[in-house]
Image (cartoon, grey):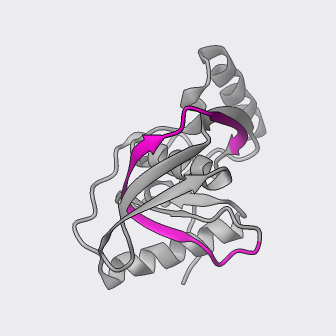
Amino acid sequence: MTVRTCLPWPDKRLRTKAEDVAEITDEIRAIWDDMIDTMEAMPGVGLAGPQIGVMLRLAVVDGSTERGRAVRLANPEILHSSIELREHDEASPNLPGVSAKVKRPRAVTVKFLNEQGMIDRRDFVGIDATSVQHQIDHLNGRMYFDRLSKVKRDILLRKARKQG
């Protein structure tokens, strides 16, 4: 298991939609292991394949305080979102040093392929719901700051450039 390097913004892969995972293999499981190591080293509550240059629809999410509860998702798809929104300060290791408050549904139901290659469904609430939505955005070539107004996004990106 390895901590992988996160791609620096504005690497074009961060704007590219990831490819579907055809089947869960030992290679896919090894990538998930590396993703969990990378997420925990940040420390973060989730990571998507494109963030480390793996252009597959793979994500890991772990909003627990004790760690070791990461959910491994391939081809995640939101089936249902709550009407109630939750605001959370979001950031990304691909654009370190900046963050922004983003409103997302408080709860989501997600369909995905699990570690055994079986179709699974899970309800995510709170920080886990925020994280899984954030990761799915990455899989679709979107960054959290794409959800901000143009003015707020421009301010955030200017601030990031000054720090870099």
Q: Is 65 in front, or is 161? A: 65
- In the rendered image, residue 73 lying in the magenta stretch gets the answer yes
Q: Quadrant of the N terminus?
A: bottom right
Image location (x, y in percent) of residue 80: 43, 43
Left-right relation of 158 to 136: right
Q: Can see residue 160? A: yes
Main secondary structure along the magenta-highlighted residues: strand
Which residue appears farthest toward the left when viewing the image? 22
Q: Residue at x 70, y 70 (%)?
A: 41
- Above or below for 5 versus 133: below
- Above or below for 61 versus 88: below
Q: Quadrant of the C terminus?
A: top right
Callout count: 0
Q: Residue at x 72, y 33 (%)?
A: 101
What is the span of residues highlighted in magenta in the rendered image?
A: 66-90
Query: In which quarter of the view is residue 88 placed?
Result: top right
Left-right relation of 33 to 26: right
Q: Is 5 in front, or is 114? A: 114
- Above or below for 76 versus 156: below
- Above or below for 116 versus 109: below
Q: Is 117 in front, or is 134? A: 117
Image location (x, y in percent) of residue 153: 64, 24
Q: Residue at x 44, y 74 (%)?
A: 31
Query: In which quarter of the view is residue 89 placed?
Result: top right
Q: Residue at x 53, y 38 (%)?
A: 82
Image location (x, y in percent) of residue 75: 34, 58
Image location (x, y in percent) of residue 2: 56, 79
- In the rendered image, residue 119 lying in the magenta stretch gets the answer no
Q: Can see residue 12? A: no
